[in-house]
Amino acid sequence: MKKSMNGLAVLIGLSLSLPVLADLKPFYTDEGVCSFKNSLGEVVVPAKNYLSCGEFSEGLTHIGVVRDHFDGTYNHYQGFIDRSGNTVIPTDHIVSESGAYGETDFRDFHNGLVAVFKSKPNAEGIYGYMNKQRELIVPYEYDSADDFKDGLAVVSKNRGLNDNPRSGVIDRTGRLVIPLKYESLWGYAEGMFIYGEKSHWGDDLIYGFLDKKGDVKVKAKWNDILPFSEGLATVNIGDWGFVDKSGNYAITPKYSDAYSFSEGLAFVRVGNEDDGKWGVINKQGNYIIAPQYDFIDPFSFSECCDSGTDDFAGAYKNGNAYVYDFMNKKKGKYGPIVRHTIDSKGNVIGKKLFADWNALYDHIWQTHNDNNS
């Protein structure tokens, strides 16, 4: 017993002497290079020449660099480090610069694989997947490649060929589980993919759901759709409502806009974008908060939707959410904005006033930077 206790004391002493490696977060220096701090604010991975670094996933995170090729061109490359800052995979993997919204398409590991890119002359390039030993598990052959989730990833071919791409799903061996035949395939959640096909009355897509085997579980019929969340999906057929996994309406479409359920609650809007009001419903469709707030997502009125979000915008997290009111709304020009922090019963538990839209935007970004510094 004494020997065991002595061994335990040694282990405790060692753990206290080592830097805290859990919950490492990236932050950017004033010079624009990124580094990592732990939950105690200690710099664990010193700033080097990394222009990009991500959140840790499966023990690794990407680090990105840019290299000038001395002919007026440059490319981004990525590699991977562990939680001690050791380079596990060198920064010699080229990165596509035609990702969503045109940003550099840095990737991280999911389900043991990461999507890797190979450029092609006079073409956008192709994707494959490699493991942590840098073995190419899935050959370079896809025009787009999503991250793996539950052992599956959406891939596509034929992008650029008469704007007629076809998407399908592969497993971790590269085997096609769902054939490359869908014009749109995305939004995997709770065992279901969203698929899109052209409607019989025109070129616009309508949407439904496939299961993991590719079987149609809910036939496409909606104009717009969001992935399943807490057993319900938000769908639009002129108005927004909610369906279950059999495609039956759990909440009849009657809202001008709606967000997915989180913590048993969902934000819905009654009225148009300019004058409508947002409230909160439960899964029975009953109002927890009657429509009364001007907006919920601070980026829904800007073109910077991919550049950050307010922590609780459009969703409940840990029992709280943010909602917003314009104090002086005149002919589309907004003055002061008040942000209410509300709980799951609709009680206002905090308020913060912003001078205008720009002040709110700056606050969100400063909060983001503070949380990652």
Image (tube, grey):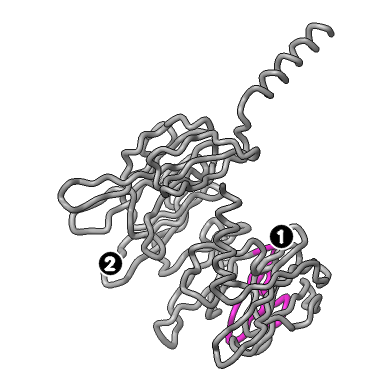
The residue identified by callout 1 is 317
Numbered range of the magenta stretch: 229-254
Number of callouts? 2
Left of 350 or right of it: where is 90? left
Where residue 144 sits, quadrant-wise, is bottom left
Residue 298 or 331: which is nearer the viewer? Answer: 331
Residue 43 percent coordinates (x, y): 55, 36
Q: Amino acid at mark 1?
A: Lys
Can residue 254 be spotted in the picture? no
Left of 364 or right of it: where is 126? left
1 or 2: mark nearer the eye: 1
Callouts 1 and 2 close, C-beta under 8 Å: no
The residue identified by callout 2 is 160
Residue 159 or 298: which is nearer the viewer? Answer: 298
Residue 311 or 314: which is nearer the viewer? Answer: 311
**Kind of element beneath mark 1:** loop
Residue 9 percent coordinates (x, y): 76, 15
Can you tell which mark lies on residue 144?
Answer: none
Residue 287 percent coordinates (x, y): 80, 79
* N-term mark: 1 or 2: 2
Looking at this view, name the residue that lies furthest to the left. 71
Q: Judge whether residue 247 is colored magenta.
A: yes
Residue 44 percent coordinates (x, y): 54, 33
**Kind of element beneath mark 2:** loop
The crowding category of the residue bearing disc 1, from other C-alpha atoms within 10 Å (few below 14, some 14 to 19, many at least 20), is some
Q: Residue at x 46, y 73 (%)?
A: 303
- Report the Cα–Cα distance between label 1 and label 2: 40 Å
Looking at this view, name the residue that lies furthest to the top. 3
Residue 48 or 306: which is nearer the viewer? Answer: 48
